[in-house]
Amino acid sequence: MQTILGAGGPIADGLVRELRRTYDGDIRIVSRRPAEVTAGDQLVAADLTDAAATSRAVAGSDVAYLTVGLPMDSDLWERRFPTMMRNVLDACIEHGAKLVFFDNTYMYPRTSTPQTESTAFEPVGRKSQVRAHIATMLLAEQAAGRVEALIARAPEFYGPGKTTSLTNTFVLDRIREGKRPMVPVSANTKRSLIWTPDASRAMALLGNTADAYGQTWHLPIDPDRKTYAELIGLAAEVGEGRSATPSCRGSPSPWARGCARNCEKFTNSYLATRWTTSSTHRSSPTVSRSSSRRRTETAFAKF
């Protein structure tokens, strides 16, 4: 049994589809209001802030994937994420389930230094501190030998459908609607981004690779990183068949209106092909790896 805790988002739904496509066995979907993603999914309604409900949801699982997300509210994160992590860890320990934690990069230093799996945490801000705290909770239980776990860490993501990332919400979705994109960060800084189906695919592989456990993994991204200005320009090319690198400020422009209908084509064709193996979330020097790590990275490279 492979169980997805906190289902319903694009990463979790993609994970269900990848597990169904690639691996044998039952799949359990757990959320407050679970919905079937593929035929035969086992649905379990549970609130992960409830320890007893979390234990029941994990019971019988070989692997549990923690993919739960919360609205971008610091108070909510501080109240719920540590409780959910504690409950999931306790449930996995109780039932002998392996744990795969889908994590982000909030806890890393906000510098231009390449980020690797060994980068020390330097959280800045309340949300970053929460993410550092819950990752540390998992690492402590793993180090003590009480749970077999791994962390699958990804940067900012983008994807098809109803993906609600910064990139989708403020850039791609607005282009699709014929509105000017809004980039609340520097539009001319190269960004590390991951395509949601790739994140799901990598996580399914890691969860079903025995020697991937006991480690943190940076999920593969395209090392040919683009700025948001460049991505917007690519969207313009798809929409109008011409090169453009529009400003991220000002009134709605003709190129945005012209490519609105084609934005889904952009996200599903060009960006979906920009996938390759990388152990870092920025262009980085070589990192030494164990033989088991190399085996899993070889599997990554076969995607």
Image (tube, rainbow, N blue to C red):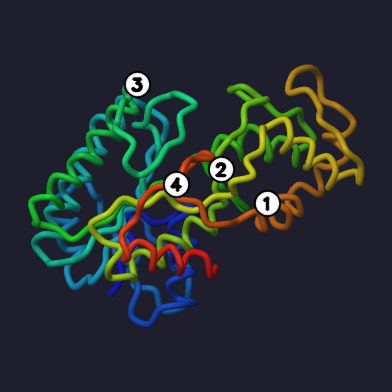
- Contact check, label 4 and label 2, Cβ < 8 Å: no
- Contact check, label 4 and label 3, Cβ < 8 Å: no
- Contact check, label 2 and label 3, Cβ < 8 Å: no
The percent position of residue 234, horizontal first and vertical second, equals 78, 42
Camera-nearest label, 4 or 1: 4
Under mark 2, the amino acid is Leu
Say whether residue 93 is left or right of residue 13: left
- Contact check, label 1 and label 3, Cβ < 8 Å: no
> Dot 1 corresponds to which residue?
271
What separation in Å lies between label 4 and label 3 (alpha carbons)? Answer: 27 Å
Which mark, residue 193? 2
Q: Residues within 10 Å of mark 3 (few under 14, many from 20)?
A: some
- Contact check, label 4 and label 1, Cβ < 8 Å: no
Q: Earlier in the sequence, mark 2 or mark 3?
A: 3
**Quadrant of the rendered structure where residue 257 is?**
top right
Q: Earlier in the sequence, mark 4 or mark 3?
A: 3
Towards the viewer: 63 or 144: 144
Residue situated furthest bottom in the rendering: 24
Towards the viewer: 197 or 105: 105
